[in-house]
Image: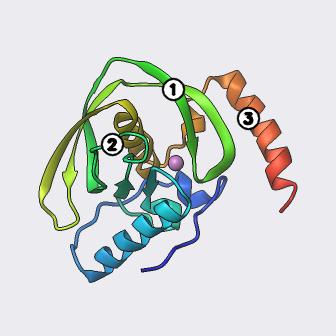
Amino acid sequence: MSVREIVKYPEKVLREKTGPVKDIDSALQNLIDDMIETMYAAPGVGLAANQVGVSKQITVIDVSLREENIPLIVLVNPEIVHLEGEIEAEEGCLSIPDYTTVLKRAMKVVVRGFDRHGKPVEIEAEGLLARALQHEIDHLNGKLFIDRMGRIKKEFFKKRYRREKLSKE
Ligand code: NI
């Protein structure tokens, strides 16, 4: 297992829709182990495969530090099948360091996918887990949380964040 480098905004791979996983093999298991280790090392509550540069539909989520009794979740080829309600909460992303914003998302979700061994799973979630699932599945569709901000807020983000972060590169 090893910690991989997290791809940062505005890298192109974050903007590409990821492809479905077809083979449950040892390469996949290694990638998942590395993603888990990378998420914990960051530290973060979720990570999508394209955030380590692999354009595949895989995400790992662990919200147990903030919401107890929810185990580590590994999802392969996940899709949201139901969204319900609306709630605002603060949100950030490991690919956009040092920036958070309050964002409206669905309050509850139902997600279907597969676990790391290819077994079908269905997860019903609310609270932080529901938010994390929406955030990570957005990643897998090439979407970032800044895309869900209003136009003016996003313009402001682009100007400020780009000036501060990208001028250092
Ligand atoms: Ni993120």
Q: Where is mark 1, residue-wise?
A: 89
Q: Nearer the viewer, mark 2 or mark 1?
A: 2
Label 3 amino acid?
Phe
Disc 2: CA contacts within 10 A as few (<14), some (14-19) or many (>=20): few
Label 2 amino acid?
Glu
Q: Earlier in the sequence, mark 3 or mark 2?
A: 2
Q: Where is mark 2, residue-wise?
A: 68
Which label number is shown at residue 157?
Answer: 3
Q: State the image coordinates of residue 54 (x, y, percent, origin top left).
A: 45, 68
> Left or right: where does residue 155 sit relative to residue 37?
right
Q: State the image coordinates of residue 63 (x, y, percent, origin top left).
A: 39, 46
Is label 3's Cβ within 8 Å of ligand 1?
no
Marks 3 & 2, CB-CB < 8 Å contact: no
* SS label for mark 1: strand
Disc 1: CA contacts within 10 A as few (<14), some (14-19) or many (>=20): few
Q: State the image coordinates of residue 77 (x, y, percent, origin top left).
A: 27, 55
Residue at 48 percent of width and 61 percent of height = 39
Q: Earlier in the sequence, mark 2 or mark 1?
A: 2
Q: For marks 1 and 3, give the CA distance.
A: 18 Å
Residue at 34 percent of width and 35 percent of height = 130
Is label 2's Cβ within 8 Å of ligand 1?
no
Q: Earlier in the sequence, mark 1 or mark 3?
A: 1
> Left or right: where does residue 60 sit relative to residue 156?
left
